Amino acid sequence: MIFPTGGHPPYALLRWLHRERVARFERSLETPEAAQRARLAAILAGAEGSDFAREHGLAPGMSLEQYRGAVPLRAHASLKPWLDRVESAEPGVLSRLPVIQMVQTSGTSGAPKRLPVTMPWAESVGAAQGLWVLGLLRDDEQLAGGAALSIVSPAVTGATSGGVPVGSNTGRMFLAQPWWVRWRAPVPYEVYGIDDVPTRQYAILRHALAADVRSWTAANPSSILLYMRRLREDWAELQRDLADGTLSRLGQRGLARRRLGDEPALPWSLRRVNTWKGGPAAFFVARLPAALGVDVPIREAGITASEGFFATPVDDGDPVAFLDGHLLEFVDGGGQVRWAWELELGREYRLVVSTEAGLYRYDLGDIVRVTGLAGRAPRLVFVRRAGNELSAVGERVTESQLLAVASALGLSALSASLAWAEVPWLRLAYAGATDVSAADFDLRLRAENLEYDDRRATGRLGLPVLSRISDTAFTAWRARRVAEGAPEAQVKDPVILAPERWDELISLSGS
């Protein structure tokens, strides 16, 4: 049993309050087929009477296989005409359920997307989040006290042409938390809405440093590294503000005070960090202990996206497929589509989801790997985005391979793109304490990728060209994405970029 009865008082109370949710989750681990049939029934109930349901012949009582036969796999581009109608506030397009807002993706690896939110969908996401919190509390009673710092973006930042509110999923999830969770937040929610990015980051640190923070949650580990850089840069000003009870940049007085030491370090009894750990995030996770000055347990934040919550972290193992939330399908390397109980240990699959928000057999484009089982439900780790690789002549260089080389060379950040010519080559921008030669990077990448090694040996690829840039260029690149409307908490550090995005990064370095 993942969530046993009993335990220390805070856990036992929270488990009792969510006993029905816990019971459904535990049953889904043992009878995944029944759990997924129930999720399909809920999805079809929401779809009933919509234009999408009529066009695809969806009806209550459909079996899993009938549903699969009625709806083709669909990427975002083919769904966009339907989503445009949702944005214009046209009712009954994808679902009969009211769309309460749209959430916007970060656009780090492509154009930002807007996706609908309905109440049943929000409740499913909240259930997965609640199980995550329950698991944290089960494992550490001290997390019941102190403050819980989260890095989020505003839940609402604007509206569509039809007046539907638009904002970030991290902010929406933050506001959807129970009152007692929000009460433990050291940063007033309105701080996350400060327009000027450096001022917002400073204000978040100012409030957080005055509190007894015991857990720090951020979708991207690179965000935590960014805030630690800001801490060092703004240390003297933060010391003055904390001693005086002010937030000088905003003209605020009478705030909580705290005395800080001489060195820029966190004054907290930090016990836990929660963040993405899979795929390229592993590169940044490995740098967290040194940046934080303390080695604390780091729990995976789950397999989540603006489209939903698909695997929830309930312990220090890999996240468990949340089969009581959305309907999940998995496409293997040969194109065969499987259900969660049909997956093989160690194999990789592309994730396809159906949700109560009007996404039907939506190809998420995320590759996940099965690492184990919780009962009969798979444990999953994120591997990479499907197709997010560099390949001019079939070399298929992935983010994880690039970051493995970057880690071996001690780099703090890396971005790559292709330079197109008769003999193409990789363009690499990096930040680090020492210069790196193109020959050294090339040699290490050849050891990581045999196809790349072959293309280099046969003269089909040229030697990479490296540009050393500052950490501030990467920070400025993130700030520009935020200024364009991307939710700050969801923007990832760039690893593989389109040529025009790479040129933009280089321009920010002054090179």
Image (cartoon, rainbow, N blue to C red):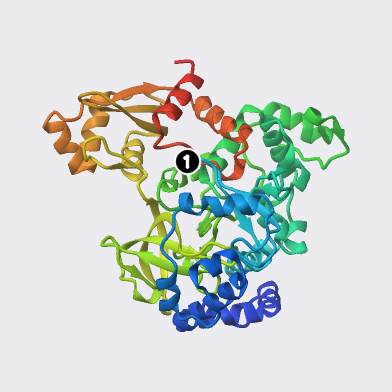
- Residue drawn at x 43%, y 77% is 66
Identify residue type, mark 1. Answer: Gly
Q: Where is residue 308 in the image (x, y as percent from the top left)?
A: 55, 60
Within 10 Å of disc 1 (Cα), the crowding (few <14, some 14-19, many 20+) is: few
**Residue name at image x 30 percent, y 71 percent:** 344
Residue 413 placement (x, y as % from top left): 43, 33
Q: Compare residues 209 and 258 and report the one nearer the observer.
A: 209
Q: Residue 211: x, y in percent?
A: 74, 48
Can residue 192 be seen? yes
Answer with left or right where residue 57 lies relative to residue 151: left
Q: Name the residue under label 1.
A: 110
Residue placed furthest toward the left: 458
Which residue is found at the position 42% from the left and 72% from the top?
Answer: 68
Q: Nearer the viewer, residue 159 or 382?
A: 159
Quadrant of the snapshot with the C terminus:
top left
**Of the pair 197 and 49, the residue shown nearer to us:** 49
Element assignment for label 1 = loop
Which of the 4 image quarters holds residue 190?
top right
